[in-house]
Amino acid sequence: MTGIDYAIILAYLVLTLAIGLRAAGKMESGADFFLAGKRLPWWAIGLSLVVTDIGAKDIVGLAQDSYRHGLVMANWDWTGCIPAMVLAGLVFVPYFWAGGFYTVPEYFGRRYNEGVRTVTTIVWGLFIAGNIAVIFSACTAVIAPMMGLEEYRTEILVITTVVIGIYTCLGGLAAVVYTDVIQCLLMIAGMALVLYHAFHAPGVGSWQSLRETVTATHPDHFKLFHPVENPSSFTTFSVVFGLGVVLGPAYWIGNQAIVQRTLGAKSMNQARGGVFFGAIVKLIFPILLVLPGILAIVILPEELKGEETKEVFPRLVKDLLPPGSRGLVFAALLAGLMGNLTGYLNSASTLWTRDILRKYVFRPYGTAPEDESSARLDLLIGRVLTILFLATGAVLSIWVQNIFETMQWMLSLFQGPTLALLVLGMFWRRATAWGGFAGIVIGLCCSQFLNSWKQSLFGYWTNGGTVWVGYENPYLHVAWWSFVAACVVMVVVSVFTRPYSAERLRGLVYGSPLGQTDPHSAQSR
């Protein structure tokens, strides 16, 4: 790192803080803080969705995992994101936006009952706290050493946290989204720079020679799906069903940090347009994030194993990039870190304010119509919770090891049952409150059981005996089978319990009129 590199990083931090404070405007209520006063345009929503999904943990983690597993990691965008984003924009986003919802659990509460709402809120709250810890881990374990300031890890973490805390607490969702725009553009530029220098590194040669060199020692690295014999668990079955059918749709339809951006849109069409625009931008990210890890097999002189694979991206930056370019890439990493972190901080404070504190701590205020006093209380609580989640994530980051896989493991523990609630709730009018409650509880228990007994459960019979897959990365199998279990339980229980009337389900199921569920929303009035 040289003086110009540090100057670029400092300029980025100052610019981000300035944009965040400028976008904050005047915060007067919880609606301003949590939903940006419903004034967000489609282009800002789309770029913000990308940054909320892809952060420093993904930049470093995908380089690490593509080095280990190859092109199959591109499925996290091409199979897991793009189809799910289209489905979200076509079906779910219009109902969430028109219903006047603040959170996804709020939809569960109206579609099923308050028990389902509370369970999903607690689960999502715990996940977000854990995910914030993963993001902090990416900062302390990777960014500081890459800057040559490993002995100042704590100081760097504190500075980054203070900058994030200032504009997130003051500006809420508006500040988060508009800073995400510059952060997304910076990420694209920084990752493109790394990829360019990696392709022009000595020894890489043409695309054909690269394939031949890599497949000589890693025969599955240029396959989008691994064969059954590969212990990675990234087989056709696990990727298509575990990722494409469960984890991807559940993430893009039911993730509070994702959905909240669309709920702050100016109109329903702006919300849908933001999701579709984000899907288009996401098409290029497997190229930017996965290929450097594969190229590192040829570029790095020695093979990295185990925890050493965390060094793949830092080594590429250190060995390939000239002064000035390193500062831009580090700024891109900080952009990914901050964009990811602010998105989850804002969504965490929204969840716990609207779905926990309103219901159990400030019960009279929580059941009353919106007024000036309750709106200001929302704003205060949201800001306090933002600070608390920041502090909690920093502490929990001590125990995070594998950055990308830790997040996927956490998602697999509850995304299957959550998707069952969303899909059956939206498309099957017969799904009942008791069916939803039983589905989420049994689904969560199933995912815990599958993860605990992964070594014994995930196997395929071959002519030579049983080949065990999924032991190394079982989360795709866990996601799929917990989804199936939740669906089966929901259907069985719903058949034997009383469903809601058609009038009660207006605006909550596909095919019913939009905007009929919230008596305080502008659409209902």
Image (cartoon, grey):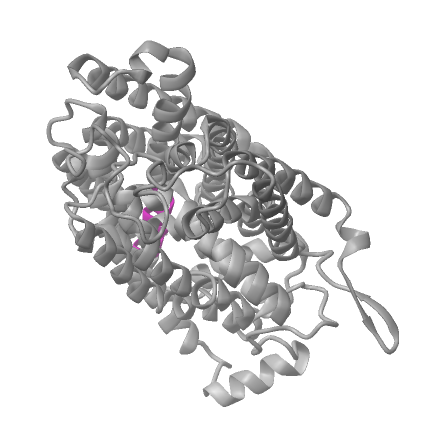
Give the extent of the magenta segment: 328-339
Whether residue 312 is visible here, answered yes or no, is no
Give the answer, above or below, for where 525 lies relative to 270.
above
For residue 268, side relative to residue 49 (left or right): left
Asked if one can make out residue 151 in the rendered structure from this viewpoint, the answer is yes
The majority secondary structure of the magenta stretch comes to helix
Q: Position of residue 182 (x, y in %)?
A: 22, 51
- Tell which of 149 and 236 is nearer to you: 236
Q: Quadrant of residue 111?
A: top left
In the rendered image, residue 69 lying in the magenta stretch gets the answer no
**Magenta stretch: residue 334 in it?**
yes
Vertical position of residue 502 compared to residue 186: above or below: above
From the viewer's perspective, is 133 left or right of 446?
left
| Residue 363 position in % (x across, y down) | 37, 12
Residue 462 at what x, y percent from top left? 83, 75
Question: In front: 135, or 171?
Answer: 171
- Closest to the observer, 413 or 503: 503
Quadrant including the C terminus:
top left
Residue 24: image location, x then y, percent = 16, 33
